[in-house]
Amino acid sequence: MSRLATRVIHEGYKPEPLAGCVSPPIYLSTTYAQESVGEHKGFEYARSNNPNREILEKNISALENAVGSCAFSTGMAAISTLVLSLEKGSHIIVSSNVYGGTYRVFTKVFQNHGLEFSFVSTKELETIQSSLRPNTRLIFVETPTNPLMEITDIQAIAHFAHENGIQLCVDNTFMTPIFQRPLELGADFVIHSATKYLGGHSDVLGGLICLKNKEDYETLKFLQKSVGNVLAPFDSWLILRGIRTLDVRMQAHERNANKVVNFLDGHCGVEKIYYPGVENHPNREVGLRQSSGYGGMISFELKNPDRLDQFLKRLEIFTLAESLGAVESLVCIPALMTHASVPAEERVKLGIKDTLIRLSIGIEDPKDLIEDLDKALKE
Ligand SMILES: *Cc1c(COP(=O)(O)O)cnc(C)c1O
């Protein structure tokens, strides 16, 4: 197969026969003509299948090395549908500082439907081992985690999971297949909030599940069609268009993030930096082994927390907003925004302080980003 920078552009679609459109047409039809009953071109009704969704699913499968993928209306819809594939009474081990919405749907929705969850640090295998129950069916990790950038050893956990008849799911939203391909490291499922880097322009919601084996793919396809939380044709088209530039964007996000980290690292107003690429990152070695990049997300703490408001007010290029992974730089306070659904005492335990700042580094000129931060950090 060709290399990633080529695959992002060419996989999943060849110019169609009618007019040779180089960009796929948007297929809005909800139903498809049949020659005779049951005789058709693979499409019957748009909830089951749609050409734009199929192109996107084939494209991401080629990037993540999956046998197949399913596209959903949001990242949360993708995660929820995966959990629906588990039997009642199943137990799931989850990385303790997962995305706030993931924490919320697990604790506030699925716990009421007879599923059990343990939120533990997945940094060390021992913690996972000691959380194991006879009914454990799935380990769900984010690596690096959001917002503390903790790194989990995918290969080691996949090995442990399979030895115990359990499956492993990795939320790969932060790294994207450009920097990390969990299925190649032994994971069974990869989740994406395509709303972030894959879409890349803050203008479309979407979620993906990429599967390593055929049986799981059939199960997820069945659930996707049955539950009906599918990705719309135009949204599929937009995400595919975003993925075309994923490789160049990820390289640019990371280049900029490295420069910003270097700037913050020497700054007297900065207390601590959380970035997989910093020298003293506790799991740096694992990160280097399993990922080819550090990504574009940085968290940090101010030396003087009283300056937080002033810092946020002074920023001009960084926009105060939730979400991440698009061309423009964003700043957020996870404890009060993306992770507000995690109870305060849980946040304290996890180390997500109310003054922790998270930056999503965009692809603007890095000099402008650094000047903006420098101005905001001034005494
Ligand atoms: C945003 C996000 C999600 C949820 O995705 P939506 O598209 O907003 O539903 C899940 N995981 C991670 C890591 C995210 O950043």
Image (tube, helix red, strand yellow):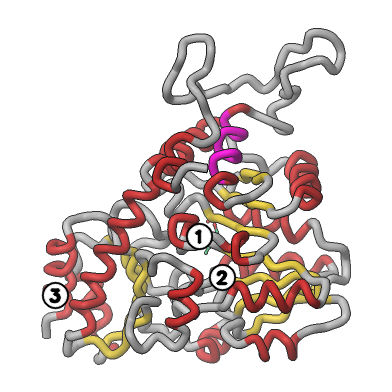
Q: Image quadrant for the C terminus?
A: bottom left
Q: Mark 2 points at which residue?
A: 142
Tag 3 residue: 374
- On the image, numbered disc 1 is attached to which residue? 173
In x, y percent, where is residue 45? 73, 25
Return the disc, 3 or 1, that comes first in the chain's sequence. 1
Q: Do the residues labelled 2 and 3 touch (CB within 8 Å)?
A: no
Task: Point out the stretch of residues depicted in magenta.
Answer: 52-60
Q: Mark 3 vs mark 1: give the one in front.
A: 1
Where is residue 366, by image quadrant? bottom left
Which x, y percent locates residue 193? 53, 55
- Judged left or right of residue 251, residue 111 is right
Q: What residue type is labelled 3?
A: Asp
- Looking at the image, residue 6 lies above or below residue 30: below
- Badge 3: how crowded within 10 Å, few (<14), some, or many (20+)? some
Relative side of 316 to 306, left or right: left
- Discs 2/3, front: 2
Indicate the amino acid at tag 2.
Glu
> Would residue 202 be visible to someone looking at this image?
no
Tell me whether circle 1 and circle 2 mark residues in contact (CB < 8 Å): yes
Residue 111: say if magenta: no
Instruction: Determine the main secondary structure of the stretch shown in magenta.
Output: helix
Lateral position of residue 166 relative to residue 336, left or right:
right
Question: Marks 3 and 1: CB-CB under 8 Å?
Answer: no
Find the distance from the CA under tag 2 to the CA under tag 3: 31 Å
- Secondary structure state at the residue bearing disc 2: strand
